[in-house]
Image (tube, grey):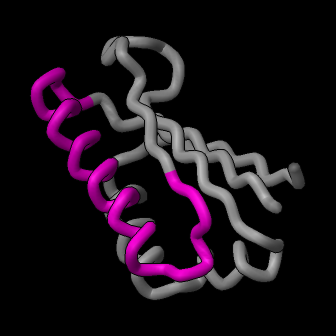
């Protein structure tokens, strides 16, 4: 199995707007579980400290293989969410590993 871990840092939104943007992205990511059959597990965590210097959100998803992860990466539903995330973030880091 492949574990796909991604961290996101949002732009400098005011607190209330940042909260709303995080919840919108979280819902969009979580909806991918039902839209992309290659996704075996998907969870999204929001940093409890909105004003932290660290990342704001973490995505953890599991795939049976690198080939399935590659299908996910180019899937039209995933690309829609990528566009939403790209508009709202300033940093992204990812690690993919077998487990």
Residue 22 belongs to magenta span: yes
The residue range painted magenta reads 13-42
Majority SS type along the magenta span: helix
User: What residue is at 45 percent from the left and 77 percent from the top?
Assistant: 79
Give 15 or 1, whichever is nearer the viewer: 1
Residue 30 sits above or below residue 50 on the image: below
Which residue is depicted at the point 48% across and 14% down?
53
Residue 89 lies within the magenta run: no
x, y percent for residue 47: 41, 22
Image position of 71 (left or right of 92): right
Quadrant of residue 61 in the image? bottom right
52 with respect to 84 (left or right): right
Relative side of 67 to 19, left or right: right
Q: Report the residue at 87% width, 49% height from top.
A: 99
Question: Vertical placement of 37 versus 31: above or below?
Answer: below
Indicate whether 32 appears above or below 2. Answer: below
Q: Is residue 5 left or right of residue 65?
A: left
């Amino acid at each position: 199995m492949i574990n796909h871990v991604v961290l996101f840092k949002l732009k400098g939104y005011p607190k209330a707007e940042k909260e709303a943007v995080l919840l919108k992205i979280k819902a969009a990511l979580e909806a991918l579980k039902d839209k992309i059959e290659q996704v075996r597990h998907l969870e999204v965590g929001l940093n409890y400290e909105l004003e932290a210097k660290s990342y704001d959100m973490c995505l953890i998803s599991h795939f049976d293989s690198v080939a399935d992860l590659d299908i996910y990466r180019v899937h039209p539903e995933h690309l829609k969410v990528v566009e939403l995330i790209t508009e709202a973030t300033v940093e992204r880091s990812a690690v993919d590993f077998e487990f």
